[in-house]
Every structure is written in C-alpha cells, then in structure tokens.
Image: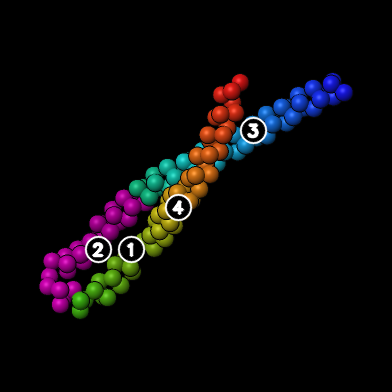
Amino acid sequence: MKKNKQEEESLEKIILKKVYGYEAKRTYKTIFILWAAFFVAQFLIVLISSSIYSILKDQQTLDLLQIFNEDFEIIRENIIDVLYAFYTESPQLLLSLFIILVLTVFGIIFFVIKNFRKIKNRLKSVNTFFSKK
C-alpha cells in the first residue's frame, strides 16, 4: 500500500514536470514569435516607408503638400484634388503593405496588452516551479 502511494507521488511529479515543461515551452515560443513578428514588422515598416518616401520624392509628388502653406479656404477647396493626386501617384502596393504592417504592429500591441496578466502569471508560475528544484 505504501509503495503504491510512493509510485503515485513520483508519477504525479513526473507528470507535473512534463506539463510545466510543455507550458514553459509554449509560453516562451509564443513570446519569441510575438517579439520576432513585432521587430520584423517594425523593420519592414521603416523599409517600406523610406521607399515610399523616396518614390514620392522622385516623382515630385511631395510638392503637392505645399498647399498647406496657403489659406484655409484654398486648402478646403483643393483638398479632395490633392488627396486624389496623392493617391494616384503613390505606389499602391507598397502603401497597402505599409498599412497591413502598421495594423499588424497595433494588433500585436493590443494582444500583449490584453493578455499581459495571463502572460505574466504564466511566466511567474513556470519560474517558481523550476526555481524550486
């Protein structure tokens, strides 16, 4: 009877260790993927925005922004035309990729903020379990 109880306790410890190991791997993998996606997206945002700026500068599309030096009435009358010209002369594919990446970065930030307490508790729990040994 006593031997069965010891075997059960050792089996329970082995199972708990494997479960905590699995959860630790899963947590660290999730954090690594989030950080990697966040940094890659930020790098791509900088790269794409600089190339968009370079293209717009070469096409002299940025000269359209001089309208903002005028009176408010002139801006109000011509803003639709300026935005349409800006849209047609901009590289739409790069612009759409830029918007998708910005939304991805905000999505990652929102996910981390929303699940911060869960992630913190998981890391604390895994750290406490492995620091006892």
Q: Nearer the viewer, residue 78 or 34?
A: 34
Residue type, mark 3 in image: Tyr
| Badge number at residue 40 | none
Q: Earlier in the sequence, mark 3 or mark 4?
A: 3
Name the residue at 28% across, 70% down: 83
Q: Is residue 4 rendered to the left or right of residue 56?
A: right
Tag 2, which secondary structure? Answer: helix
Q: Is residue 54 magenta?
A: yes
The amino acid on which the numbered mark 1 sits, given as a three-letter code, is: Ser
Circle nearer the N terminus (1, 2): 2
Q: Which residues are magenta?
A: 48-75
Name the residue carrying label 4. Answer: 110
Q: Report the disc number at residue 90.
A: 1
Dot placed on the residue nearer the N-terminal end, 1 or 4: 1
Q: Please tell me the numbered disc located at residue 20.
A: 3
Q: Are marks 1 and 4 in contact (CB under 8 Å)?
A: no
Mark 2 neighbour density, 10 Å: few (under 14) some (14–19) many (20 or more): some
Give how far apart the Cα atoms at labels 1 and 4 are.
29 Å
